């Protein structure tokens, strides 16, 4: 009798689990939200649901409180794919997208226009008491007109945040691109992935992750250990910066000195950091590995990489290897690292007046020279875009095989800046001589595997197309040996421009076009390419 009851109970339990699983698969809902209706759907969202926002103008913010999906069943809030977009306009009252106590949430395919109102963030995980946010994905956002003040941020976390993915977002002239963590170290950003983002002309930081205090990883169920990966981002501070606030393009702070999280680290690779007239390109402390990056800063006061004690915390485990660096000041500088830990600088190609200033840090297999001699090693080190090519000349930057035993636990340690298999006898970020897989440009990097997504250097069997700059402010240049017609269409369909002919270069004046997302259609005998073009303005800002 007991056995029969137990068997029936097990069958009933299995049927109940099957019903729950089936219900999750069957009853997930998709809601269609329009500018005057979308708010009513927010309280209804359940795990697995999607809120699809139609193209249009949205003047009320996305206030996301207590919206939580589940592992494998996130809640998705998305704008349309393609050239049409859902535009959210900032309001002085509050941040445009506000996140409080949210989990397993995806926010994507939106344009956020701050209207240059000071001190409102595009996306913010709020820092009021008791808040947290985890397993949040923020992707494919276009953030414009968020430069009304230096402390206006594209994506900000002011509460404890873990397991975030921030990818393929474009920030045009913000106050700061990303500011993750609180300034006093009380809001740790844990185990994140930041990839394929484009930050152009921030007033201050392009990306900053703040230091973390001890004893904060106490929320039940949270991720308490991990790494944060920062890869394949493009950050430029070539213009539009705040001269009163020198800040690096990318800064990472330390993890807790002891206890949970003290062994966390950053893996930072495949990034392109371009120009900073009043500061440097990368600053880091704590535990980090910095590899296969390309750094260029030809401004007299601008350095490239600096690691030193910050907020009372010295550099600990630091690996800096296989980067290509051009600097008009210092290349790699490390001050007062913690001698109880390992610091290693290996296999870099550094061209600067002071290539290495690293004290007693272990240094092996680097190639160093003054910047004027970079042409003896690199294909085209002229600091202009497009055109700069920092791949090695044939036979240059070679030497004995580098000992990579310290790097084997790092993700993609054996791939170069372009994702090619690394040859350990070459110094610098590239494993191949000659034409790189991705031309250095101020645009979103393509996916490393396949090189097919969001790339302005589009290739076909018979020719090559170059679209530059993208994003564009005053003009855009389109080049191809097979270019016969160009059509530019506004995101709302209201603006259309067509040019026809056989000129291999077309220049389009974009200075009077409204900022936003456009579609470029390029045609020729063996050419048909459809490409997104972003137009923005570098306006006057406080």
Image (spheres, rainbow, N blue to C red):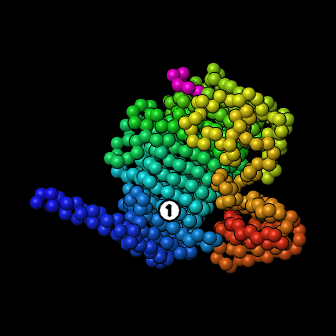
Residue 492 in the image, given as x and y percentages of width and height: 64, 76
In percent of width and height, residue 278 lies at 69, 41
Q: Is residue 143 above or below residue 291?
A: below
User: Which sits in the foreground, 134 or 35?
Assistant: 134
Q: Quadrant of the N terminus?
A: bottom left
- Which residue is situated farthest in the left direction here? 1
Q: How many marks?
A: 1
Q: Is residue 16 magenta?
A: no
Q: Is residue 482 left or right of residue 73?
A: right
Q: Secondary structure at mark 1?
A: strand
Q: Quadrant of residue 17?
A: bottom left
Instruction: Give the residue at x 41% y 73%.
Output: 29
**What stretch of residues is rendered in magenta?**
338-343
> Can residue 229 be spotted in the picture?
yes
Could you tell me residue 419's position as x and y percent? 67, 47
Magenta span has 340?
yes
Could you say which is closer to the camera, residue 322 or residue 93?
322
Viewport quadrant of the C terminus: bottom right
* Magenta region, main secondary structure: loop
Residue that mark 1 sits on: 107
> Is residue 282 visible in the rendered structure shown here?
no
x and y percentages locating residue 516 in the rendered image: 65, 67
The residue at the point 60 percent across, 30 percent down is 405
Q: Is residue 259 left or right of residue 210?
A: left
Q: What residue is rendered at 17% in x and 58% in y? A: 6
Looking at the picture, does residue 9 appear above or below residue 494? above
Neighbour tally class for label 1: few under 14, some 14-19, many 20 plus, Cα within 10 Å: many
| Residue pictured at 45% horizontal, 69% vertical | 50
Against 340, residue 491 (above or below) is below
């Amino acid at each position: 009798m007991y056995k029969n009851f137990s068997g029936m109970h097990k069958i009933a339990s299995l049927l109940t689990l099957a019903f729950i699983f089936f219900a999750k698969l069957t009853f997930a809902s998709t809601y269609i939200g329009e500018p005057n209706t979308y708010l009513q759907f927010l309280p209804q969202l359940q795990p697995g649901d999607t809120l699809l926002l139609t193209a249009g103008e949205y003047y009320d913010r996305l206030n996301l409180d207590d919206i939580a999906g589940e592992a494998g069943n996130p809640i998705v809030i998305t704008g349309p794919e393609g050239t049409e977009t859902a535009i959210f306009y900032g309001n002085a009252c509050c941040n445009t997208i506000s996140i409080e106590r949210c989990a397993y949430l995806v926010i994507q395919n939106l344009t956020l226009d701050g209207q240059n109102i000071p001190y409102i963030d595009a996306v913010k995980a709020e820092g009021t008491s008791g808040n947290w946010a985890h397993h949040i994905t923020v992707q494919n956002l276009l953030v414009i007109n968020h430069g009304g003040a230096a402390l206006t941020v594209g994506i900000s976390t002011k509460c404890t945040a873990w397991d975030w993915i921030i990818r393929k977002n474009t920030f045009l002239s913000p106050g700061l691109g990303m500011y993750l963590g609180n300034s006093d170290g009380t809001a740790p950003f844990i185990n994140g992935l930041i990839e394929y983002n484009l930050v152009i002309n921030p007033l201050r930081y392009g990306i900053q992750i703040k230091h973390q205090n001890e004893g904060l990883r106490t929320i039940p169920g949270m991720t308490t250990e991990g790494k944060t990966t920062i890869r394949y981002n493009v950050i430029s501070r070539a213009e539009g910066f705040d001269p009163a606030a020198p800040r690096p393009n990318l800064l990472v702070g330390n993890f807790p000195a002891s206890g949970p999280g003290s062994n966390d680290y950053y893996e930072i690779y495949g990034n392109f950091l371009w120009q900073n007239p009043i500061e440097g390109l990368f600053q880091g402390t704590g535990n980090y590995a910095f590899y296969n990056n390309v750094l260029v800063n030809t401004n007299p006061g601008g350095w490239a990489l600096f690691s030193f004690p910050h907020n009372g915390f010295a550099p600990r485990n630091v690996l800096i290897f296989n980067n290509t660096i051009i600097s008009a000041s210092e290349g790699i500088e490390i001050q007062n690292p913690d001698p109880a830990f390992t610091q290693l600088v290996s296999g870099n190609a550094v061209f600067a007046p002071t290539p290495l200033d690293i004290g007693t840090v272990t240094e092996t297999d680097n190639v160093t020279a003054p910047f004027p001699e970079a042409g003896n090693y690199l294909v085209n080190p002229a600091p202009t875009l497009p055109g700069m090519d920092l791949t090695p000349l044939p036979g240059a930057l070679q030497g004995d095989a580098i000992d990579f035993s310290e790097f084997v636990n790092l993700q993609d340690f054996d791939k170069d800046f372009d994702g090619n298999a690394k040859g350990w006898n070459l110094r610098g970020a590239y494993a191949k001589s000659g034409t790189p897989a991705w031309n250095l440009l101020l645009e979103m990097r393509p996916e490393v595997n396949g090189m097919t997504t969001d790339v302005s250097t589009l290739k076909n069997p018979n020719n090559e197309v170059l679209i530059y700059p993208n994003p564009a402010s005053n003009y855009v240049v389109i080049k191809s040996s097979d270019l016969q017609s160009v059509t530019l269409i506004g995101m709302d369909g209201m603006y259309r421009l067509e040019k026809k002919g056989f000129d291999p270069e077309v220049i389009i004046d974009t200075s009077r076009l409204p900022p936003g997302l456009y579609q470029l259609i390029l045609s020729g005998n063996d050419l048909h390419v459809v490409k997104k073009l972003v137009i923005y303005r570098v306006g006057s800002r406080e």
